[in-house]
Image (cartoon, rainbow, N blue to C red):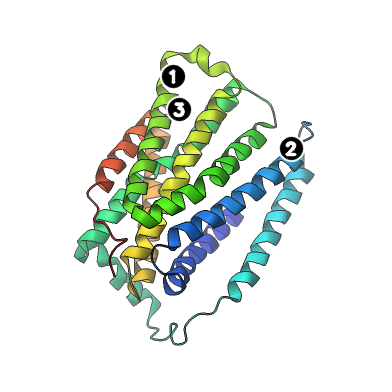
Amino acid sequence: MGALVLFSLARGFCSVSMKDVQGKCIPKKRRGRLSGLASTIGGTATVILTALLFWDRGDPGVLFYTLLLLLAACLWIIAGFLFASVDEYEGETGGGGNALGDALKSLSLLRDDAPFRHFVITRALLLCSALASPYFVVLAQKNSDTGWLLGVFLLASSLASSISASVWGWMADESSRRVMIRGAIVASGACLTVGLTALFAGEATSSVWFYPAGFFVLSIAHAGVRLGRKTYLVDMAGGNKRTDYTSVSNTVIGVLLLATGGLTALVSMISDVAVILTLGAMGLAGAISATRLREVTEDQ
């Protein structure tokens, strides 16, 4: 758990710095396709790696997962060296201040900046595409006890990213707002379809491929939601606002994840299906909220 916390903190740092550097170095109408291409390459590599790792359908052991984590660690280190080679404009790191004071001042953006506040609310509702994934896995595990179920879901996720991310990226360069709307609708549809099917036609879910197929569609939607909101945030903000927007947004979403996690834990006491249906309704609300966001792709 401690290692997971440390990993999450590090990913938070990467999120802020990546969006800041992307906004400085990449012009509008190219940011979406850049993120999409990166996700496609990563997804394709993961598909190949998954096929190689899970080719032997024996029961994976501790050594297998240890080697998998070591491989992931090596990839992060390589990414760090590559990112260090990116040239930033001189002077962009100047003007430092008191960390706590600046952090509290940045939180006032939620009160004073209405478009940003609306974006954060929309992003919170779009969490459904990420939060629903574990419950798809839980329901699948109840119908199958194979140790290689992880490989099936990993393959579904990486394959979805490899075939859809570039498409979402090109669409985000035209309108990241519409990408969020479409991704949210697909995510909501996947959750409601899987949830209602599991509720009213339990025998139809006995197939080993039912939940991975639903997970595949949900992963496509999640790729769109992620690319849409990332591109929207970078396009919406400019200059120093970009780091403030990203850090405040990530902080608020982190707090909301804790709250939503507690809420879904309570709902899961009723059933896992109830959680999926709740998240499906949440995604639909996110799509409606996104329709009220202003377009930012054409802004200078």
The residue to which callout 2 is attached is 54
Residue at screen point 79% across, 45% down: 63
Q: Is residue 227 left or right of residue 159?
A: left
- Residue drawn at the location 53% of the way across and 57% of the way down: 8
Q: Judge left or right: residue 76 versus residue 179.
A: right
Q: Secondary structure at mark 1?
A: helix
Chain-order first, disc 3 or disc 2: 2
Residue with the mark numbered 3: 272
Q: CA distance from mark 1 to mark 2?
A: 29 Å
The answer to whether the residue labelled 1 contacts the one labelled 2, judged by CB atoms less than 8 Å apart, is: no
Frontmost residue, 252 versus 172: 172
User: Which residue shows up at 59% across the image and 24% down it?
Assistant: 209
Horizontally, residue 273 falls left or right of residue 203, namely left
The correct choice, above or below, for 134 with respect to 39 in the image is above
Label 1 amino acid? Thr
Query: Callout 1: 10 Å neighbours few (<14), some, many (20+)?
Result: some
Q: Is residue 26 visible?
A: yes
- Labels 3 & 2 near each other (Cβ < 8 A): no
Q: Position of residue 82 (x, y in %)?
A: 63, 70
Amino acid bearing label 3: Asp
Q: Which mark is residue 116?
A: none
* Foreground residue among 77 and 164: 164
Measure the C-alpha gap from mark 1 to mark 3.
13 Å
User: Residue 52's image quarter?
Assistant: top right
Which callout, 1 or 2, points at the residue further toward the start of the chain? 2
Residue 75 sits in which quadrant?
A: bottom right
Task: Name the kind of residue labelled 2 in the image.
Answer: Phe
Q: Label 2: few (<14), some or many (≥20) within 10 Å?
A: some
Quarter of the image with the C terminus is: bottom left
Task: Residue under label 1, please give it.
Answer: 197
Q: Is residue 270 visible?
A: no
